[in-house]
Image (tube, rainbow, N blue to C red):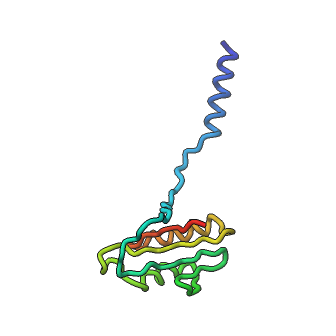
Amino acid sequence: MTSLVDVIFLLLLFFMLSSTFARHGELELPLASGGAAPVASVPPVFVQLLPEALRVNGQELTLPEAPAAIAALADPAADGGPGRILLALAPDLRTQRLADFLHLMRGLDGWQLHVLGG
């Protein structure tokens, strides 16, 4: 009986130390799909996310400047439909940089973000 208590105690200790109770944040990442795109009067915004740079329609910006620059391009709510942001990722891009960009884009209402595949 004593050895059974020891085994149960060790299992309890193992599961307590190996489990995590913290909730991790989630970022929604929709992928662009093929097919006919809906016709909208608001043209899509092309964003290139590089390891050291960010380009919005060819204009180089810093990461904090991107939401204001995209919002200034057009008002998708005036058209009645959502605006589209096409995001191209560099092959050597770090995940944290993508997470920072997605976090900043959460504040843009009326825009849909689509990640282009490589």
Residue 90 or residue 64, whichever sits in front: 90
Q: Residue furthest bottom?
A: 59
Vertical arrangement, residue 8 with respect to residue 52, above or below: above
For the C terminus, the image quarter is bottom right
Measured from the top left, where is residue 65 in percent x and y? 52, 82
Give 65 or 6, whichever is nearer the viewer: 65
* Image vertical order of residue 118 relative to residue 74, above or below: above
Q: Residue at x 47, y 65 (%)?
A: 34
Which residue is situated farthest in the top direction here?
1
Query: Residue 110 lies in what quarter of the image?
Result: bottom left
* Closest to the observer, 113 or 63: 113
Residue positioned 48% across, 68% down in the render? 114
User: Residue 85 in the image: x percent, y percent?
Assistant: 47, 74
**Residue closest to the eye, 86 or 72:** 86
The percent position of residue 29, horizontal first and vertical second, equals 50, 62
Question: Which residue is at a point 63% across and 75% down the rendered structure image?
Answer: 50
